[in-house]
Image (cartoon, rainbow, N blue to C red):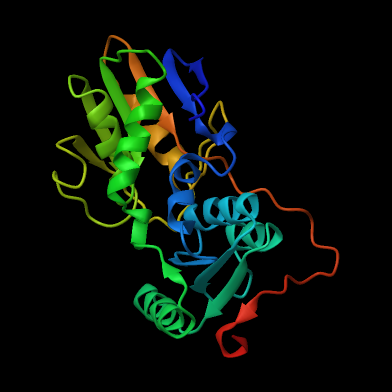
Amino acid sequence: MIKPIVQMHDGILVVRDDLYPGGTKARFLPLLFNGVNEVVYASPPEGGAQTALAVCAQSLGKHATIFVAKRKKPHPRALMAKRLGATVVQVKPGYLSVVQARAKAYCKFSGARLVPFGVDLPEAIAIIAEAAKSIEEEPDEVWCAAGSGVLARGLAKAWPNAKRHVVQVGRQLTSLDVAGAIIHVYPQPFSTECPLSTPFPADHHYDAKAWQVAVKNSGPGKVLFWNVTGPAKIEKETGGKAVLEDEDEC
């Protein structure tokens, strides 16, 4: 287990998992490759799990396949996953339910392993908690972005006595999803980027939104913010057009 890097920004302790290859999800995604050579995920176009999965597959010498909604201009996340060696399959129509159905059908046909949406794995809670405890800090208040709530549950296990806050950036969350943390709802959909800059590299569909809310609403005492990942990094296109697979080519 690699200990997270923590830095102080604007008076808040920031866990810089944007410095961890693939981000926080890459701490536990390798588990999914045990016993299989291919892992499949149905992702929103902006979702960070697709690049985390691609990083893990590349490091293990295995293969990641990402199903994602077809867009006129592919999202940088999909392009980054492609350049890391993943197969990125564009689905049309691009409703998430359709993307998930296509991914499930592909796994049934190929024998590949399907990742649960949001990478909601029981083992992830313990791995996140272990990483958090290794920081050797006892924050009074903890903040993070929340999609599925996995990170929030892991942080609750690490710091059960802290006042915990999550910023809902996607689907509607319940108290159970986030282990009783206070839920703040970001006013714009997941697909919308946060317009404000952050003092560290942050995903503007995800962590940057939570940072914006945390800076405005954090209380006194020792406050900690968990940054899951940075923005997607891609090289400039030389041919003018990215080449991703369409589902009828699979």
Which residue occupies the foreground of this view, 219 or 233?
Answer: 233
Q: Which residue is drawn at the image coordinates 50% and 72% (left, top)?
A: 67
Asked if residue 161 lies left or right of residue 214, the reply is left
Which residue occupies the foreground of this view, 246 or 186?
Answer: 246
Q: Quadrant of the C terminus?
A: bottom right
Where residue 144 sits: x, y (%)? 35, 34
Q: Which residue is drawn at the image coordinates 46% and 61% (left, top)?
A: 35
Question: In which quadrant of the rendered view does residue 127 lie?
Answer: top left
Question: In which quadrant of the rendered view does residue 97 lie?
Answer: bottom left
Q: Which residue is drawn at the image coordinates 62% and 70% (left, top)?
A: 87
Where residue 74 sits: x, y (%)? 62, 68
Asked if residue 241 lies left or right of residue 36, the reply is right
Q: Is residue 133 above or below residue 92?
A: above
Q: Residue furthest front?
A: 35
Question: In which quadrant of the rendered view does residue 160 lie?
Answer: top left
Where residue 29 sits: x, y (%)? 46, 50
Q: Is residue 117 above or below residue 154?
A: below
Question: Residue 217: in sight, yes or no?
Answer: no
Asked if residue 109 lies left or right of residue 181, the reply is right
Which residue occupies the foreground of this view, 78 or 29?
Answer: 29
Q: Is residue 247 above or below residue 57?
A: below
> Exactly how many numbered labels are in the figure?
0
Which residue occupies the foreground of this view, 188 or 235?
Answer: 235
Q: Residue furthest bottom?
A: 248
Asked if residue 190 lies left or right of residue 1, the reply is left
